[in-house]
Image (tube, rainbow, N blue to C red):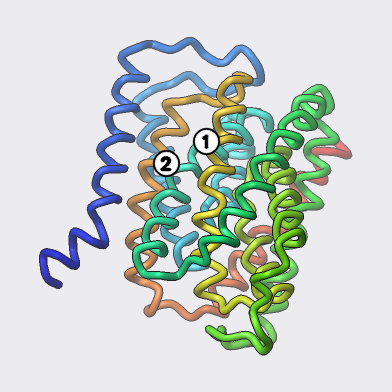
Amino acid sequence: MSKKDFLEKYVMVIILLLLIVAALCWSLRAELPQPAIGSSPPVSMFLLAMLMLLGVGAGFFGGLLGLGGGLIMLPILSFGMGFSTTMAVGTTLFAVIFTTISGGYAHLVRGNVHTRSSLLIALGGVTGISLGSGVFTVLTTQMKMLSLILGLFFIVPSLYMIWDALCHREPSLNVPGTPHFNRSKDIVFLGLTVGFLTGVLGLGGGFILVPGLTYLFGFPVQLAVGTTLTAVIPVTIAGGGIKLWQSYVLLPAALSMGLGTVIGAQFGAISIRYFKDSTLKLVFGLYFLYVAVRYIIDYWA
């Protein structure tokens, strides 16, 4: 790889990593108070190291599966790291900001983005996430209801991945039909829907947007992924900023996970050719199904 190619691919990643490290150091030196809303573990170097490793793993497997990592990080924060559901949602969404920036830039420089559709999705998404964040504030007083919604929501990607893996469908870069780039209102509505769900659930929404653009609008898969990642950058920034303002983000934790996801995503992109797509989807489909059951049990407990 020439120096020019290396800089083109990784200069944004390096700058982003340096910015995250600087922000993390500032957040630790500033001795920010614990968020007043929800519960989270006390900040320690051990916790931050574990969260960065979690981010690396989420970014790595997210890169292999085309996910932003939020689906992996959120349940682990909820069930294994001592975060309340509300704090897990806010902290995860803030961490996903850095994954989308890194991934969106990578696709943009490779020409895998339909700019107009990306802007339309972002327009609907920012509006939707504002509405969803308002609903999330209401749900914070109904923790069991939030657990039920998350559980039902995790069923969708779990069943889709299991079905996709067992059917052994080969991924295709082309989908029959002509891309419908001119359906502006429908694309804005899709962005509005995904933004609303992102505001409520704290997930990036890529696993909805990618199949939506692919099967409803006829986008080739690579174009759908690139357009999605660039579109959700302002959506996750808006949503993460709102969650931070609402005191649902443990900032050092979010920055540590964000640092890990950016690193992990690069290794995932490099390693993707060594993994069988159907095996990964089956494993994570079963994992998401387990997560769905755990959240639903929390509702009935």
At horizontal 52% and vertical 14% (from top left) the residue drawn is 34
For badge 2, the amino acid type reads: Gly
- Residue 249, given in percent of the width and then of the height, sits at 55, 26
Q: Taking 237 as reference, is 128 left or right? A: right
State which tag comes first along the sequence, 2 or 1.
1
Residue 12 is tagged as none
Label 1: few (<14), some (14–19) or many (≥20) C-alpha neighbours in 10 Å: many
Q: Taking 21 as reference, is 64 left or right? A: right
Q: Is residue 261 above or below residue 65?
A: above
Q: How many marks?
A: 2
Closer-to-camera residue (291/244): 244
Screen quadrant of the C terminus: top right
Q: Taking 291 as reference, is 119 left or right? A: left
- Residue 127, given in percent of the width and then of the height, sits at 70, 40
At horizontal 50% and vertical 44% (from top left) the residue drawn is 96
Residue 94 is tagged as 1
At horizontal 76% and vertical 51% (from top left) the residue drawn is 193
Q: Secondary structure at mark 2?
A: helix
Do tag 2 and tag 1 residues touch (Cβ < 8 Å)?
A: yes
For badge 1, the amino acid type reads: Phe
Q: Is residue 102 above or below residue 196?
A: below
- Residue 130, given in percent of the width and then of the height, sits at 70, 34
Residue at the front extreme, as displayed: 182
Screen quadrant of the N terminus: bottom left
Label 2: few (<14), some (14–19) or many (≥20) C-alpha neighbours in 10 Å: many
- Residue 31, given in percent of the width and then of the height, sits at 38, 11
Residue 258 is tagged as 2
Q: Secondary structure at mark 1?
A: helix
* Distance between the alpha carbons at the discs numbered 2 and 1: 8 Å
At horizontal 52% and vertical 66% (from top left) the residue drawn is 114
Closer-to-camera residue (256/127): 127
Q: Quadrant of residue 260?
A: top left
